[in-house]
């Protein structure tokens, strides 16, 4: 299970170290794509396969389905973990997430997200202030 948040440096060659605790679950090869909320999403192959099947099952007759499929699939790359546990972030993904030198890698159970550190802190600050409101909205799900 991928949990926690870790701050790392994006080097001049656009490589970032994947937290050691995440490497086994993500595997040697992983998929990185555009994520929601202007971050990058990192998937292990099995999770990516399941997500791909769900997106592919959406009705292609609707513009929203086509657009979301394009957003996810056209923005995806398969990347390899190097011998130091780093992955390469392509320019177009670095620009999409507006990644600077410091990034946060956050574990979200079956996948991870890569955020620009400043953007992550701002986002985290907002959701921490709204946690009770979010819990109230999700109350009918029986989670809490």
Image (spheres, helix red, strand yellow):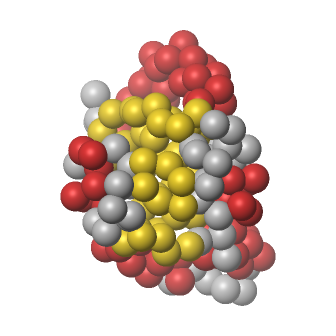
Horizontal side of residue 129 vs 19, given as left or right? right
Q: Residue furthest top?
A: 129
| Corner quadrant of residue 144 | top left
Q: How many marks?
A: 0
| Corner quadrant of residue 83 | bottom left
Residue visible at 50% across and 49% down? 16
Is residue 51 something one can see in this rendering? Answer: no
In this rendering, the answer to whether 66 lies above or below 30 is below
Q: Which residue lies furthest to the bottom in this view?
A: 61
The residue nearer to you, when weighing 64 against 89, is 89
Residue visible at 53% across and 83% down? 56
Residue visible at 73% across and 62% down? 92
Image location (x, y in percent) of residue 49: 39, 78
In this rendering, the answer to whether 9 lies above or below 49 is above
Horizontal side of residue 1 vs 33, given as left or right? left
Image location (x, y in percent) of residue 98: 73, 44
Is residue 124 something one can see in this rendering? Answer: yes
The residue nearer to you, when weighing 3 against 10, is 10
Horizontal side of residue 62 vs 13, given as left or right? right
The residue nearer to you, when weighing 106 against 66, is 106
Image location (x, y in percent) of residue 23: 28, 55
In this rendering, the answer to whether 21 lies above or below 124 is below
Residue visible at 68% across and 38% down? 100
Image location (x, y in percent) of residue 29: 37, 72
Horizontal side of residue 78 vs 47, given as left or right? right
């Amino acid at each position: 299970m991928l949990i926690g948040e870790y701050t790392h440096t994006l080097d001049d060659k656009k490589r970032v170290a994947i937290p050691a605790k995440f490497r086994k679950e993500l595997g040697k090869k992983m998929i990185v794509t555009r994520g929601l909320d202007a971050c990058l999403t990192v998937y292990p192959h099995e999770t990516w396969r399941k997500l791909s099947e769900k997106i592919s099952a959406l009705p292609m007759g609707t513009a929203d389905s086509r657009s979301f499929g394009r957003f996810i699939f056209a923005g995806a790359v398969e990347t390899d973990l190097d011998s130091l546990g780093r992955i390469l972030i392509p320019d177009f993904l670095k620009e999409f997430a507006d990644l600077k030198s410091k990034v946060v890698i956050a574990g979200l159970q079956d996948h991870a997200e890569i955020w620009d550190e400043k953007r992550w802190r701002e986002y985290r600050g907002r959701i921490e202030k709204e946690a009770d409101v979010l819990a109230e909205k999700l109350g009918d799900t029986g989670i809490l």
